[in-house]
Image (cartoon, rainbow, N blue to C red):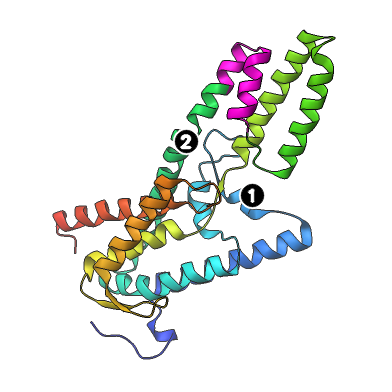
Amino acid sequence: MSYRSSFLGSITPVVKNLLIINALVFLATVIFRSSLGIDINGIAGMHFFLSQKFNPVQLVTYMFLHANLSHIFFNMFAVFMFGRVLEQVWGPKRFLIYYMVTGIGAGLLQQVVQYIELKPFLDAIDFYMQNPSHDDLVVLLKQYLHPASIEMARNMQVFTRSYDQMAASDPQGALQLSLDFVRQFRIDYLNAFVTIGASGAVFGILLAFGMLFPNTVLMLLFPPIPIKAKYFVMIYGVLELFYGIGNFRSDNVAHWAHLGGMLFGFFMIRYWRKKGLY
C-alpha cells in the first residue's frame, strides 16, 4: 500500500468531508451557544428514546456533535489516521456506509443499555403513580429519584418542604402534589440523557483497521511504546467493556456506544468477507 507524501494529498474524499463537516458543526455549536444562547448539542444530540426530546434523526446527527475541542480533536485525529487507509482499501462509498452504520449502530446499542439501566427507575415510578402512599414516596425518594442536575435538585428541595408542610393537614393534597412532582421528575430525568460524538464510528474504524491490518505496528503516545494493531484494538475493547459494566457514577463517557460501533463494524466486515465484497 502506498502513502502519499503531502498532508493534503493524503486525505481521502470522504475523510476530508467528515473532517470539514464536523469542524463546521462544532464551530456553529460554539457560536450559537455563545451568541444566541441556543444549545445545538441539546437539540440534535441523541436523547433517550422515551424522552420527550427524542427524535429518530438524532441517531444520525449526534455523531457530528462534540462537547469540546479535545473531544472533536481526538475523534477527528483517529478518523484521519485510520479512516483514510480504510477508504483507500474499500473506496469512498463503502467506507461512508461503514462509518454511518457503525455510528448509528453505536447509538442503538447505547439506547438498549440505557433502557436496561433505567428500567428499575421507570418501573418504580409507574408503581408509585398507580399506588401512591407516604411510605412508598420515602422509598422512591431514597432509592430512585437521584437529581441529574442542579435545577432538579433544587426542585426536589422545594417539593419536600411543601410536601412536609402539607402532609399533616392535607394528606390527600400532599399525595397529589407528590404525583405531580414525580411525573415531572420522570420527564426531566429522561430529558437529561444526551449522547454526542463520533466516537462510536471511530471505534468502528479502529476495529476495522485492526481486522484488516492486524500486524501493523502502532506507536502509542502514552506510554510511547509500539504495539500491533490487533492487540491495540483488543485492549481498547476490553477497557470499554470494563468501564461499561462498571458504570462508575463519575464517568459520563458512552462506553456502550463505543462497543456498539465495534460490534456493528465486526459484523459488517464479516458479512463483506463472506460475500467476497473486498
Magenta stretch: includes residue 113:
no
Q: Which residue is mark 1?
A: 42
Q: Residue at x 24, y 57 (%)?
A: 269
Picture layout, residue 120 above or below residue 29: above
Magenta-colored span? 125-145
Say which quadrant the N terminus sits in: bottom left
Residue 273 falls left or right of residue 189: left
Q: Position of residue 3 (x, y in %)?
A: 30, 85
Q: Secondary structure at mark 1?
A: helix
Q: Residue at x 23, y 71 (%)?
A: 213
Q: Which residue is mark 2?
A: 117
Picture layout, residue 32 above or below residue 195: below
Q: Position of residue 177 (x, y in %)?
A: 76, 18
Name of the residue lying farthest toward the bottom: 5
Give the amino acid at mark 1.
Gly
What secondary structure is the stretch in magenta mostly built from?
helix
Magenta stretch: includes residue 130:
yes
Q: Position of residue 125 (x, y in %)?
A: 58, 22
Q: Nearer the viewer, residue 76 or 257?
A: 257
Q: Position of residue 13 (x, y in %)?
A: 40, 74
Dot 2 crowding, Cα within 10 Å, few <14, some 14–19, many 20+:
few
From mark 1 to mark 2, how far is it between C-alphas? Answer: 21 Å
Say which quadrant the C terminus sits in: bottom left
Dot 1 crowding, Cα within 10 Å, few <14, some 14–19, many 20+:
some
Q: Secondary structure at mark 2?
A: helix
Give the amino acid at mark 2.
Glu
Question: Picture quarter containing residue 38?
Answer: bottom right
Q: Residue at x 52, y 71 (%)?
A: 73
Labels 1 and 2 touching (C-beta < 8 A): no
Residue 79 falls left or right of residue 252: left
Q: Nearer the viewer, residue 151 or 247?
A: 247
